[in-house]
Structure formats: C-alpha cells, structure tokens
Image (cartoon, rainbow, N blue to C red):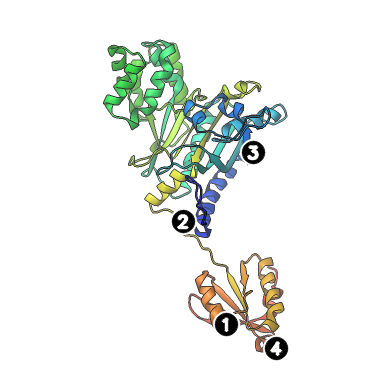
Amino acid sequence: MQFQRVKGTEDFYAEEQAVQDRIFSVLDSACRSRGFLHVEPPVLESFKLLSAKSGDEIKEQIFMLEKRGDEELSLRPELTPGFARMFIAKQKEMPKPVKWYTINRVWRYEAPQKGRAREFYQLNVEMYGSSRPEADAEIINLAIACLSGLGLSSKDFVIKVNNRKLVFAILSQWIDPKMHDSVLRALDKAAKISPQEFDAELQKAGLTSEQIGVVKSLRISAPVNSFENLINPYCKSPEAINALNELKAVLAFVPKDFVLFDLTLVRGLAYYTGIVFEACDREGKLRSIAGGGRYDDLIATYGGDATPATGFAIGDKVLTLFLQEKGLIPKPELGPDYFVAPVDEKVFAKALEIAESLRAQGKTADIDVLGRKLAKNFEHANSIGARNVVIVGEKDLAQGQVTIRTLATGQERKVPLAELLHPKKE
C-alpha cells in the first residue's frame, strides 16, 4: 500500500524548500530591519479563543480536535488570536509599542484550489500600543518592503487602502446601522461578483432601491492624490470628516505610487476597526497577496487592557504563485561548496578531517560514505550540484597536499593540506 499526502497539503522536497527558505529569508530580514521581534505562538489554541472575534467564514474552516474532557482545542486558522493571547499575558511589563512577527503554518478546512490550501504558511506582523497614523503607515510600509524585497515593484502590485470608520460614517447617513454588517459583507464581495449578484446581495440585506443606488455609488477607487474630490460629497457628518482626516494622515506617510484608495475595501475579518489595506495584483489575476489593518478592540475582547493594535499577514501560496507569474522565483543552489572524495578507505579518516575543517570554516562540505570509485564520485558530485571536488589520495597526502577540481571548468589545482586544515585567519 502506498500512502498519499493529505488533500490540501504540500510536500516540500529540497528544491521547493530552498525556494521557500529564500523567500522567507527576505520577509524575515524586512521585519527585523524595522525592529520587529520574532515570536512563536503554539499550533494548538482553544476553540473559544479562535472563534471569539474571527469572521463566520474562518469559524467554519477551523480544524477541531476530538474533544477530550472539557477542552475544545483547534489547529490555528490564523495567528492574530494567539499573538493577542501572548500579548495580554505580559502586556503590563513590556515597553510599547510591542512589535512582533512570525512566519509559520496555519490550517483551514476549505476546498483546495489555486492559491488556497488546507495547510499553508503565513507571515504575521503585529504592532500593539500605538493609535497614531504613523503606526498604520509603518505597517503598510513594511508590507511594501516585504514584496519589494522579492523583486516586485509598483508596476506589479498596488496597496488598496480604506478606513472602515469612513464606510460606517457614510452609510449611517442613509442606512440603519443594524444593516451595516450586511452591506459590508456585500461590499467585501463586490470585486468578486457580477453587478447583478451585487444588487441581489443588497436586496437580501433589506435595502430599498434608493439605498442600493447610494451603496453602488460608493464603489469609488482612485489614486491617493485625487480621491478626496470624489469622496468629499459623501462626507457631511463630523464622523465622516474625522474618518477621512484619519485616513489622510496615514496616507501622508506611504509611497503614493504603491497606494490606491478603495472605498469598497472593508476586509472580511470581524475584528477590524479602522484602517484596512490589501496588496493586490495590478493585473487582477490573483486574489489579494497581503492584507491587514487596525483592530483596536481585539485585546479588550480577549480580556486584556484596551490597547490599540495594527498588523498584516502574507500567505505563502498566493505569494509564490505571484512570484512565479512574474518570473521572480529565486533559483536555489542546493549543492555543497565541496564534495570530498577519498580515493580508497585507507584515506577516509583524513578525508573526514578535511570535510570537518571546511565545515568549521563556514563552507558546506559533503563526503562519500558509499565507498565509490573516483569516476563515480565525480558523477555524483555533478548530480548534486557540488561546486568543487576535493580528491584525497595517498600519493598527494604523502606530499602534504590534495587535488581540488572545480566542476564548472574542469580545472584542477594542488592545494597544501595545511591550507585546508589550518587556514590563516584574516
């Protein structure tokens, strides 16, 4: 019987893993360069925690473990609730703002398709303790830096930005606040459904023809240097004006060529309270590459002291597809710097000593452990992508040297043994 991998999961063989490592290394460096600290929440969390503020869609996708005793445990479908729990545990003793990130696995029970899987990796970034627009801008700018660091430019992706407070304030002028959630759900789907389906969603929410007309007129998308003229006519209330000013304050600190205002952007997760954003493919071929925003009520919801918070996430599946689409997948170099080939078993001990010395110098060094003939070792070294072969033979050792062949050119050179075993320190 041959076992198959579980549907919606992926095997990472050496080449795929090397590509993923390179991508994650870029994301990791971008976060660290801005003072974010790497933390690790556990894989298992209580279902109560995970479902407290997640949207209905994510609640339905949670992998539940078989209940034992009174505990209902789940595999995390996202990382923010775990971060929030960790923050609350030590929030009184940590200097603010707290800036955390991780790159780790999450699980969602959904139908596997292009860009979606049941097990995937996510970069999760959170900042706790600042309600200022500079904090939102720092988060958006980090998302841009992560994608730019992978070779993507403003010609490839755009950051759509909105303020949920602005949407609520504008809707309140025409629509009962009790109906806002239904309207937001329809707006969240607007880009993915036909105009007829969008109308049907609004009718289902109980809106009149006049109200539907108002909502449809709010499908405003414009560059940040021109959106005000389009949105100003709708900002009659003090709440709408304040929300607009809040958004403008954030946009003042982000690069304009990467950003687009989109009033229909509300994001699906129920815990967002203010600024929201998504990184999208300029050509519109893929779903959002990154997304995040502000969630100032989340910490208090989980029992902590009220704390402003903002953050974002990038999923590896859509990101990898996007990089493939743009021809930007990094080419991995899997082979070792050196393959050490003892001519026979009599010199294996010295060959091993050479390999260990190279490793101690920070080089990667493999060694023959199958007792191959030299010709077979050259074949093997080529097949694994080694850059050099160190030939260790009795005659060379008697003269205090070894032969090194550079595989790309076929050139060989004699190297003093002492140079490999005891290199001069610079």
x, y percentage for residue 234?
35, 16
Q: Which residue is mark 3?
A: 42
Q: Which residue is mark 1?
A: 374
x, y percentage for residue 21?
54, 53
Total marks drawn? Answer: 4
Between marks 1 and 2, how big is the CA–CA gap?
A: 33 Å
Between marks 3 and 1, how big is the CA–CA gap?
A: 49 Å
Residue at image point 54% right, 71% down: 386
Between marks 4 and 2, how big is the CA–CA gap?
A: 44 Å
Is 26 left or right of 44, judged from the image as shown? Answer: left
Name the secondary structure under disc 3.
loop
Name the secondary structure under disc 2.
loop
Q: Which residue is mark 4?
A: 398
Earlier-in-chain disc, 3 versus 4:
3
x, y percentage for residue 56?
48, 26
Does residue 98 appear in the picture of this structure? no
Using a 10 Å C-alpha cutoff, classify the residue at mark 1 as few (fewer than 14 neighbours), some (14 to 19) or many (20 or more).
Answer: some
Earlier-in-chain disc, 3 versus 1:
3
Residue type at mark 4? Ala
Between marks 3 and 2, how big is the CA–CA gap?
A: 30 Å
Between marks 1 and 4, how big is the CA–CA gap?
A: 19 Å
x, y percentage for residue 53?
55, 24
Q: Residue 330 bears which disc, if any?
A: 2
Name the secondary structure under disc 4.
helix
Residue 149 or residue 408, whichever sits in front: 408
Between marks 3 and 4, how big is the CA–CA gap?
A: 56 Å
Residue 184 or residue 205, whichever sits in front: 205
**Considering only vertical position in the picture, is 414 above or below 42?**
below
